[in-house]
Amino acid sequence: MGIPFVTEFEFSYGKVDRLSSRIRRVICNNPGPFTFTGTGTYLIGNGQVGVIDPGPIDEAHIEAILAALEPGESISHIIITHTHGDHSPASAPLQQKTGAPIYGLTPPKSKDIAINSDAPQMEEHADDAFSPDVEVAHGDVIEGGDWSLECVFTPGHMAGHMCYALREEKALFTGDHVMGWSTSVIIPPDGSMSDYMASLDLLLARDDEIYWPTHGTCIQKPQDFVREYIRHRKSREAQVLARLEAGDSDIREMVKVVYAAVDKRLHPAAALSMLAHLQDLVERGVVSSADNPTLDTKFTLA
């Protein structure tokens, strides 16, 4: 059936929307090819409020987050899904204004895998300066006044990616791990296809009833959505294997065939996605390479 993307929803930049009794959202005016309409910052709970992914350093957005509070409310927690530049940098100035502790994962060091010097920048820069007050781990529970968030570790899009489950509503804040408007970008060395697929399996085994990604609107019937995400990735893997079986060995040449219907300006991004698939296949022993997989490596079926 294909992934049932939702690419249209109503919102206004800087305006707070009440999504449920415990969830509010303010969207930053930073639209782009990786941010869609912009970073959606979530305010969790009432009274003592948790903020998930305050976004980039954008003074207007930070002020909009503060203006979203009701009289007498305060921000008690600042919570980060991962440290790309459209998610975490505003945590520091928001903390200066509120005194709230920051929860998240210290940016992990990238895997020792080269891509090559001319690889395009296809994702927001990493916020290497991010340093949480509280280092979270899978299974931890962050508690506020009328809310609690369970930490769900989901590496793949980035090695330190964490989702958060609002237990009172069976709602999962998925960051960039699963998005309703597009597939998630998996770009080495920060991204890992093997980790990503394992993290999708982890979500499939959960009983969450709704997803709230940082970009775009909510995902209904999330398990069905994740199944389509997995099917899409396995289909792409099969296409890569078919090209190797046909005798292709170079990523850029394979991209010309596999992504023939895609605008050629997007082929550099497609090549990095294919590299992530090939790294995974090499790790599993399905594909061979003479050295560590890069965009310039020659690949063969094992």
Image: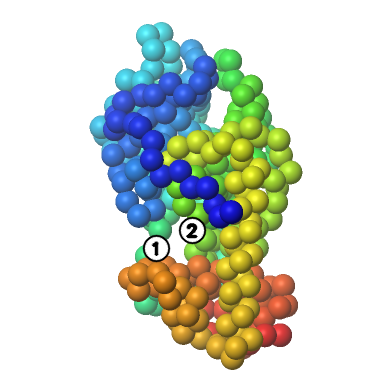
Q: Residue farthest to the bottom?
A: 247
Q: In this view, does 260 lie above or below 38?
A: below
Q: Nearer the viewer, residue 184 or 136?
A: 184
- The quarter of the image holding the N terminus is bottom right
Question: Looking at the image, which residue sits at the far front?
Answer: 1
Few, some or many residues within 10 Å of mark 2 (<14, 14–19, 20+):
many
Three-letter amino acid code at the position of disc 1:
Met
Instruction: Tell how many labels.
Output: 2
Q: Mark 2 points at which residue?
A: 185
Q: Would residue 61 be found to the left or right of residue 278 on screen?
A: left
Quadrant of the rendered structure where residue 165 is? top right
Of the numbered discs 2 and 1, the one sitting upstream in the chain is 1
Q: Where 47 falls versus 182 (above or below)?
A: above
Locate residue 34 relative to residue 21 in the image: left or right.
left
Which residue is located at x 50 percent, y 54 percent? 183
In the image, 288 versus 254, the foreground residue is 254
- Would you name the residue on which mark 1 appears? 122
The amino acid sitting under disc 2 is Val
When the figure is inspected, residue 116 is found, relative to residue 203, above or below; the finding is below
Residue 179 is situated, as x and y percent measured from the top left of the image, at 50, 46
User: In the structure shown, which secondary structural element does the residue marked by tag 1 occupy?
Assistant: loop
Residues at marks 2 and 1 touching, judged by CB atoms closer than 8 Å = yes
Q: Distance between the residues labelled 2 and 1?
A: 9 Å
- Give the residue at the far left of this rendering: 60
Q: Which residue is drawn at 58% across and 15% down?
A: 146
